[in-house]
Image (tube, rainbow, N blue to C red):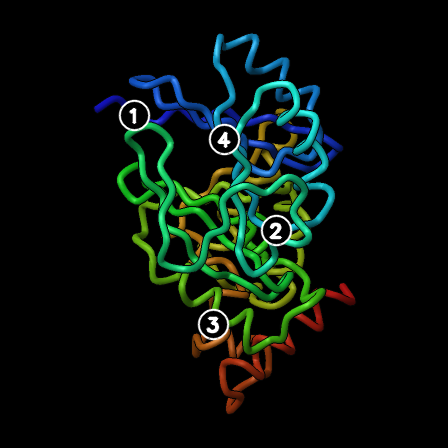
Amino acid sequence: MPDLVIHQIPVLGDNFIYLINDPETGETAAVDPAVAGPVMDALAEHGWTLSHILITHHHPDHTGGNMELKDATGCTIVGAAADAARIPGIDVRLNEGDSISIGSHGAEILDVSGHTNGHIAFWFEQDKALFSGDSLFSMGCGRLFEGTADQMWTSLQKLRALPDDTRVYCAHEYTNSNADFALSIEPENEDLRRRADEVVSLREQGKPTVPSLLGEEKRVNPFLRADNDDLLQAAGLVGRDAVSAFAEIRRRKDNF
């Protein structure tokens, strides 16, 4: 079976839209299309026809292109059942444990609420690809606009449990600022220092820092390490339970 083709489209300064294509069937999905124009241009460039839109959460910088793309292509819009009322044009409503297929490539649905209620992620296990929206970023996580620290920590633990060779396709290019914050928490983490240097180099070359590898995120992302003894020691949080430590790290990032 041919590999899933993933095309990254940078928009709005720091957003990423993804086109994912099954070469065997031609089915193509747009993940979190903030705007329609660049998606239509990329489809034309590749000779693809849009069959699906996959939505991780309702924010306009993830759904803004939904209706224009649906009107132009007749595609099927897929999103969380729990947040269907806020997803423009939704056709298919999914819950955790459900699946969706793009051609012969299947994705498991994970409930990763916290940034918003009703946030989902799409995990294409056979393709080692996770579309995490604004739940997990490279060296970061989404702000808690609607959910609680407990909810977000539970969500991040689900993502942390995925295989190390999973590529994390998050929805924003926030990695440089996330690295600065992570270093303020855990400055002696050598894996983190190496990754931060790599990020600076990539950005200086005008290259994206996404996708990242989940195995590396487990070593460098402070929001995945709220139960790690080294991080707790470095952050002055020894004795805190994981949810409390996570909440404090998130508070610090909000004010960084």
- Tag shown at residue 52: 4
| Position of residue 220 measured from the top left corner of the image (x, y, whole percent) | 48, 58
Q: Residues within 10 Å of mark 1 (few under 14, many from 20)?
A: few
Q: Earlier in the sequence, mark 2 or mark 4?
A: 4
- In three-dimensional space, the C-alpha distance between marks 2 and 4, rounded to whole angstroms, equals 15 Å
Q: Residues within 10 Å of mark 2 (few under 14, many from 20)?
A: many
Q: Which kind of residue does numbered mark 4 sit on?
A: His
CB within 8 Å, label 2 to label 1: no
Q: Which kind of residue does numbered mark 3 sit on?
A: Thr
Determine whether 227 is above or below 31 in the image: below
Question: What is the residue that sits farthest to the right in this orientation?
Answer: 255
Q: Earlier in the sequence, mark 4 or mark 1?
A: 1
Please identify the quadrant where the N terminus is shown.
Answer: top left
Name the residue carrying label 2.
57
Name the residue carrying label 1.
3
- At 51% across and 79% down in the image, what residue appears? 232
- Tag shown at residue 154: 3
Q: Nearer the viewer, mark 2 or mark 1?
A: 2
| Position of residue 87 measured from the top left corner of the image (x, y, whole percent) | 65, 47
CB within 8 Å, label 4 to label 1: no
Answer left or right for 41 relative to 53. right
Answer left or right for 70 relative to 191. right
Determine whether 69 is above or below 80 in the image: above
